[in-house]
Image (tube, rainbow, N blue to C red):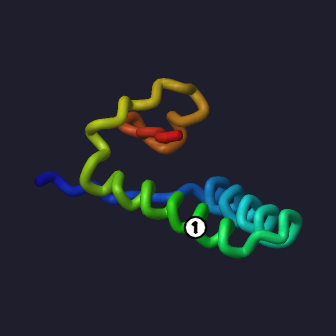
Amino acid sequence: MKSFTIRISKQADIDIESLNYYILEICKSPITSKRYIDGIFHKIKSLSYSAESYPISTQKSKLQYGYNTRRLN
């Protein structure tokens, strides 16, 4: 099985932290925050072995990360 290196952009990391803060502090939902953020990182880590199942992004804003950048929602 082919393995890929996963890099999280600085902006994505900031976005995840902001989301965590919002769910944890604003919504006052620590369990939901933990589960949701853990789910995000689980999905990101799954890219290391399933990246080829996602299409290569052709958005100009993603080209700064290379020509084989993949994006999942």
Provide residue 60's location: percent of width, then percent of height. 57, 27
Task: Classify residue 12 as left or right of residue 64.
Answer: right
Compared to residue 50, the image places residue 60 above or below, namely above
Name the foreground residue: 24 vs 48: 24
- The residue at the far left in this view is 1
Within-10-Å neighbours for mark 1: few <14, some 14–19, many 20+: few
Q: Is residue 63 left or right of residue 67?
A: right
Q: Across the whole image, how many numbered discs are drawn on residues?
A: 1
- Pick the front one: 25 or 5: 25
Quadrant that contains the N terminus: bottom left
Where is mark 1, residue-wise? Answer: 35
Q: Which sits in the foreground, 9 or 41?
A: 41
**Secondary structure of residue under mark 1:** helix
Tell me the quarter of the picture where residue 20 sits: bottom right
Left or right, 4 with reference to 69: left
Determine which quarter of the picture holds residue 70: top left
Q: Name the residue located 27 percent from the left edge and 39 percent from the top edge.
A: 52
User: What percent of the width, then of the height, locates residue 53?
Assistant: 28, 37
In this picture, residue 39 sits left or right of residue 36: left
**Where is 17 relative to 58, above or below?**
below
- The amino acid marked with disc number 1 is Arg
Residue displayed at 40% across by 34% down: 67
Q: Residue at x 58, y 67 (%)?
A: 35
**Looking at the picture, how far across and down is residue 14, in whole percent?**
70, 61
Coordinates of residue 2 in the picture (x, y in percent):
15, 52
- Which residue is drawn at the image coordinates 53% and 58% (left, top)? 40
